[in-house]
Amino acid sequence: MLSNLQKQPADRIIGLSALYRADPRPEKIDLGVGVYKDAQGNTPIMRAIKKAEKQLWNEETTKTYTALIGDGGFHTVMHELILGDTVDRDRVSYCATPGGTGAIHHVLELVKMTGTGGTVWFSDPTWGNHLTIAKHVGVPVGKYGYFDAETCAVDFDKMMADLNGIAQNDVVVLHGCCHNPTGANLTKDQWDQVADLIVAKGAIPFIDIAYQGFGDGLIEDTYGPRLMAARAPQMLIAASCSKNFGIYRERTGLILAISPDAETNAITQGNLSYVNRQNFSFPPDHGARLVTMVLSDPELRADWMAELEEVRLGMLSARKKLAEALRKASNSDRFDFIADHRGMFSRLGLTEAQVDRLREEHAIYMVFDSRLNIAGVTEDKIETIANAVVSVIRT
Ligand code: PMP
């Protein structure tokens, strides 16, 4: 039986990490996988998370199951963090999942279960897993223009023209902030126009928010999701706590599904419970509980916010410095967009052959589409990276 299985394509980003680990050159630089790293190249456990873990060890008296949709306290704090008071809770259903990826998978399953057959539209480009999960779940997929390869900014005209062709009950996936892989994001005015168009078409916005607090600020990064929630009668959100709480391996994510009314919401909630039950029954609790503790305790919350802000400002500063170094090395403004991008990534607009040369000749690892993890751009490496990039675009 197992011999009937077809070989699956390897995940290219995970493959890149393996290549990096196997590279014996001591000067190698990892700008690949999407994990935050500090100046020493470590991915630290955040202070507030560590404190909450100690407290939990002392206080937790049972490891029995939580609810199928996870703990209610987690839903409450995450609703407040992402949506504030933009939508009444009697229209919102929740479902804790293993990571943001689990939330994306379940949302797409839920979309399929509605039976409308609507197309799920993704930005071109988008996070590679979006497309493979959609294919795996079996929903029809469409792509809308998003990125201008020349300017490395959002191609808003193309985006609006493509979205103008969507149908009622289609689903439009939008990155809540910090677009992966491009780093190019919608302005407030553009969010406004996209929201109007989606609502006018009777389509459903599906927001993937995996980097809240990494862009313009913790609340600023919810501008799009909140605007959309205030206007759209129905909406889906997949949230990840992996990055902004630094709890990658705890697998902590949440679905928030907004229904048009409380009656529909009760059915939506039941369906979310069902989806968890059929896939793996109860969701993981440890990470969700830590997030709940951190967000509910004023002292832990303040410390978490302060550390997250340090992370955000560090990445912003690296953006400015790298753009500056590239301006000097290339004697042009070609890479100035790096300072305008937000979040952990920027797509540099290099060819795959140039990315290969960076890896082979300079031991600099970035994703094949020239996505660079800005958290890997530490002070001591900026000049090396800038010079290497310029050398591969010149020769
Ligand atoms: N969405 C996007 C756009 C992401 O980049 C990621 C992480 N790479 C996720 C969702 C989900 O992350 P996780 O499953 O680790 O929470």
Image (cartoon, grey):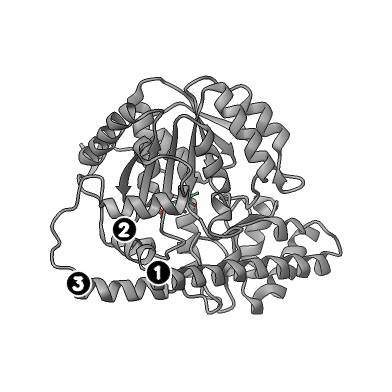
Q: Which mark is residue 288?
A: 2
Q: CA distance from mark 3 to mark 2?
A: 16 Å
Image x and y of residue 167, in percent:
54, 20
- What amino acid is at disc 2? Ala
The answer to whether residue 363 is visible is: no
Q: Do labels 3 and 2 touch, CB within 8 Å?
A: no
The structure residue drawn at horizontal position 37% and vertical position 66%, both measured from the top left corner, is 294
- What amino acid is at disc 1? Pro
Residue under pointer 1: 298
Judged left or right of residue 108, residue 205 is right
The structure residue drawn at horizontal position 34% and vertical position 33%, both measured from the top left corner, is 109
**Res. 62 image quadrant:** bottom left
Residue under pointer 3: 59
Q: CA distance from mark 3 to mark 1?
A: 18 Å
Judged left or right of residue 338, residue 113 is left
Image x and y of residue 363, in percent:
60, 69
Look at the image and tell me in which quarter the C terminus lies. bottom right
65, above or below 259, in the image: below
Asked if the beta carbon under badge 3 is closer than 8 A to the nearest atom of ligand 1, the reply is no
Image x and y of residue 117, in percent:
41, 20
